[in-house]
Image (spheres, helix red, strand yellow):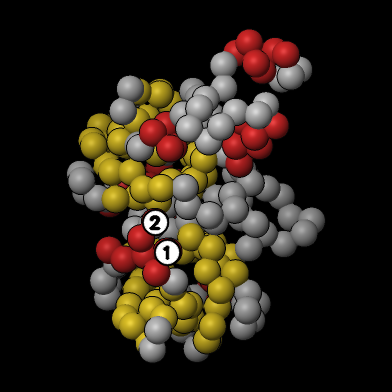
């Protein structure tokens, strides 16, 4: 479990096939503090298991499904990545509950300055879009963000100065893919209301279930 508060921007050292698996090597410092073999680290919001450790890097194996469903396959040596260690019991949750299980990828449509902030428009697939609500949570490349506006084809988020400086999001180019994970509570509500995976949840159903 993660909070969506990025601890460090790491750098990809290598990504390649090792036997039947793929291995991702990331150089970092803060994310290594207290980390042991088998621990979980979110890389661009993807929960990965530490398979090897060095003094300045860790290695994680990637399954083919991970490469298909996330943007990790787009990485190259030198690519910056958002890193977060798993939340420790008893610590404050500054963002929201993030599982590190990416639902799908979106694409950066535009970045517009808004005072000191930057408003980022992201195109999202229907599998993600149906869970979006204004002022709701979403994890974008592992960073916990608030949805500013829900649009017909996606949504917008606003990056404050701290987020611009401590995540990779401000440096993304138009057209780049980002990993998206919706708030898991929305999926549980949908499931409890008995809606099929291809459906949505309307206000009347929420009222009947006691959620509104």
Residue under the point 44% across and 73% down: 62
Measured as percent of width and height from the top left, residue 78 is found at 27, 72
Q: Residues within 10 Å of mark 1 (few under 14, many from 20)?
A: few
Name the residue tied to disc 1. 65
Q: Quadrant of residue 23?
A: bottom left
> SS class of the residue under badge 2?
helix
Q: CA distance from mark 1 to mark 2?
A: 6 Å
Measured as percent of width and height from the top left, residue 101 is found at 53, 54
Residue under the point 42% across and 31% down: 129
Name the residue tied to disc 2. 69
> SS class of the residue under badge 1?
helix
Measured as percent of width and height from the top left, residue 164 is found at 37, 47
Q: Quadrant of residue 112?
A: top left
Residue 85's label in the rendered image is: none
Q: Residues within 10 Å of mark 2 (few under 14, many from 20)?
A: some
Q: Which quadrant of the rendered structure holds the N terminus?
A: bottom right
Q: Quadrant of residue 111?
A: top left
Residue under the point 29% across and 50% down: 177
Task: Please state which of residues 57 and 30 is positioned toward the viewer in this rendering.
Answer: 57
Task: Please state which of residues 116 and 179 is positioned toward the viewer in this rendering.
Answer: 179
In contact (CB < 8 Å): disc 1 and disc 2: yes
Residue under the point 42% across and 64% down: 65
Task: Please state which of residues 106 and 121 is positioned toward the viewer in this rendering.
Answer: 106
Check the image and report above or below for 199 versus 20.
above
Q: Is residue 28 visible?
A: yes
Measured as percent of width and height from the top left, residue 88 is found at 72, 62
Task: Please state which of residues 76 and 21 is positioned toward the viewer in this rendering.
Answer: 21
């Amino acid at each position: 479990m993660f909070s969506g508060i990025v601890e460090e921007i790491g750098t990809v050292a290598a990504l390649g096939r090792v036997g039947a698996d793929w291995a991702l090597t990331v150089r970092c410092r803060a994310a290594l503090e207290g980390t042991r073999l088998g621990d979980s680290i979110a890389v661009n919001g993807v929960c990965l298991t530490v398979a090897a450790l060095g003094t300045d890097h860790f290695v994680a194996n990637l399954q083919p499904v991970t490469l298909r469903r996330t943007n990790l396959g787009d990485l190259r040596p030198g690519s910056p990545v958002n890193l977060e260690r798993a939340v420790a019991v008893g610590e404050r949750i500054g963002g929201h509950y993030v599982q590190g299980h990416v639902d799908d990828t979106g694409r950066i449509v535009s970045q517009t300055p808004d005072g000191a902030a930057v408003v980022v428009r992201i195109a999202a697939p229907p599998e993600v879009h149906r869970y979006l609500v204004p002022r709701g949570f979403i994890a974008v490349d592992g960073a916990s963000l608030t949805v500013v506006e829900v649009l017909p084809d996606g949504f917008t988020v606003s990056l404050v100065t701290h987020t611009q400086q401590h995540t990779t999001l401000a440096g993304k180019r138009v057209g780049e893919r980002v990993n998206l994970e919706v708030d898991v509570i929305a999926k549980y509500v949908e499931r409890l209301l008995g809606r099929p995976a291809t459906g949505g949840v309307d206000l009347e159903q929420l009222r009947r279930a006691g959620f509104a």
